[in-house]
Image: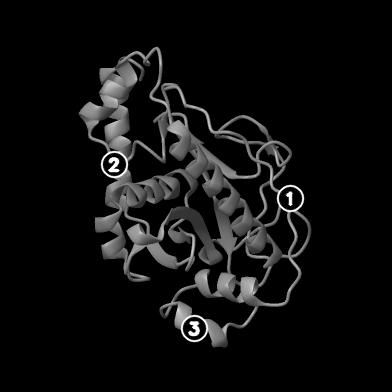
Amino acid sequence: MPTFDHVTKYAAAGCLVKPLLVNFFTSGEAFRLKIETAKPLDRVPDGWFHASTHPGLTEGQLVTYLTNPPPDKPEDFGYIGRMSVMLGTIMHEVTRQALVQLKLMVPVVPGICPACGLAQPRLCREHGASDLETRSRGHLDGILHFGPPPPGPPPRVFAPENLWGFDLKTIKNVILGKAPDMDEAFFKERWPTYWWQVQEYMRLTGLRKFIVLFQGIGNPWDLREYHVTFDPVAAYEIECKYLNALQHAGLS
């Protein structure tokens, strides 16, 4: 694992990913990648709860989502929205490839993704998770492994205590502002939707630690890292809300 003594000014104590990425991108190490992306399209409601949207909603809002017919013409992203999503996708792939080259990213196991049903890793390269009972699913940006790499080719047995979920958020630098690294309470208050999202990912996967990294878009390309621990009360609340909403909607 690379050392990063000369970039400690970029990260608070305890950061794991941020200083490694700064060190990697400022080093002389070769780095080439090929990125494929597509224009983002509107996602029509599909009767499933999604980790990126639903965990923090109220039970009433979840019932409305399940029972209201989808609009004939979904609200359009518009030019700014579509360009933002595509640029975010590019930054996600750059970061993913860097973490792969740093040998931190746990590879997906060949097979069928439980979240989208596509073949892995040919058509889906993200770790998917789902729970049929609560009709919930989602894709993680990654699972990271800190510690000695396990031997042999995939599938490998990783020590659970060395595993972290990982999620990258692209954001305007002005919105990121002077947000402090490594302050979970601040993160939960400032971005509650994201806090609930990673709690749901941990509920679905069994992971108990999560790293959320914010990437500011444009100069000075700020990074902020937050570590989120599993909250069993929040997980139970999500499960209860989902099950009750499904029952009220006649889908249980």
SS under mark 3? helix
SS under mark 1? loop
Provide the residue designation for mark 1: 34
- Looking at the rendered structure, the kind of residue marked 3 is Thr
Where residue 187 appears, as percent x and y from the top left, is 31, 60
Provide the residue designation for mark 2: 56
SS under mark 2? loop
The residue depicted at 54 percent of the width and 33 percent of the height is 40
Most extreme residue toward the bottom is 5
> Where 97 sits versus 203, above or below?
below
For marks 3 and 2, give the one nearer the viewer.
3
Q: CA distance from mark 3 to mark 1?
A: 30 Å
Where residue 28 appears, as percent x and y from the top left, is 72, 77
- Looking at the rendered structure, the kind of residue marked 1 is Lys
User: What number is the disc on residue 4?
Assistant: none
Provide the residue designation for mark 3: 8
